Image: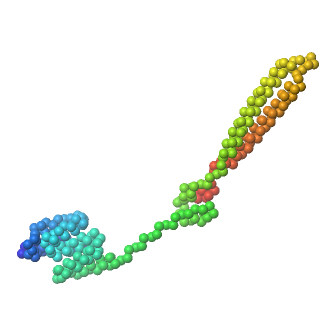
Amino acid sequence: MITFRAPLLAVSGLAALIAGTLAAPGAAEADPVKATAHFERGTRLYQVGEYAQALEAFKAGHLEEPDPSFLFNIAQAHRQLGHPREAITFYRRFLSLDPATPMRADVERRIRDLEAEANRPSAPIPPPPRPLAFSPAAGHAESKAAPAGDLSRRDAGPAPEGPSRWPVWVGGALTVGLAGAATAVSLTTRARYEDLATSCGKRSAHGTGCPVSDVDRIQTRARIVNGLWGLTALSAVVTGVGFYLTSPGEPAAAVAFRF
């Protein structure tokens, strides 16, 4: 019978591996040399915290040369990986194959601890927070669902659109048009008046003067010019008031939620 012993880790602190005897059962396919190599590789991997690779090395060693020490080391690796049920299974297999082991009390204590851990109910996942709703009528009540500073204009939703401003632009265009018309009529009336003043106006000293119809036309055009300028002024005032009333400003609801 070929046997070997290799110390693993002292049984104290977080984890311990045992030093066992790998005894060949006499099967023709058993390879103690390979089993020893897997044992040593698994030990080194376990010591540097590579528990998943150490687990595979111990499994491979047990397949080459079945021995209770491999089962204990497999259980240790499962425990370090956070697999309590698998660790319990291999601890029990170790005890069943080596019931007289001096580590029995320690292994049974580990099994009890792992069973308590495996049966401990997991903490329930808290439900997601209720989404914050906003409505103009209940805005202040809803704002209490979040701490001060969490709300902004974006959180309160899009600001309500203000009144349409297209009448303002129409009024502005109308004002400009009336002013242009008043200016044009005023200039033509002025030119006609000067023509009359330089022609028939000079004959007024001789009693002839300008025709009454020409004078009436000049007076009519003057009244038209005055009317156009009056309409221009009125349109400008109305347009200015409309521009002021439709200017964008801070919505009342958005300001209420700014801390």
Front residue of 238/167: it is 167
Please, which residue is most extreme toward the bottom here?
100
* Horizontal side of residue 182 vs 31, given as left or right: right
Compare residues 244 and 80 and report the one nearer the observer: 244
| Picture quadrant where residue 258 is located | bottom right
Q: Could you tell me residue 203's position as x and y percent?
A: 89, 17
Q: Is residue 105 visible?
A: yes
Classify residue 225 by image quadrant. top right
Q: Position of residue 2 (x, y in %)?
A: 7, 73
Specify the quadrant that holds the C terminus: bottom right
Q: x, y (%) of residue 125?
A: 42, 70
Q: Quadrant of the N terminus?
A: bottom left
Using the image, determine if residue 235 lies above or below residue 66: above
Q: Is residue 249 above or below residue 222?
A: below
Residues 183 and 258: in front is 183
As drawn, the residue found furthest toward the right would be 207
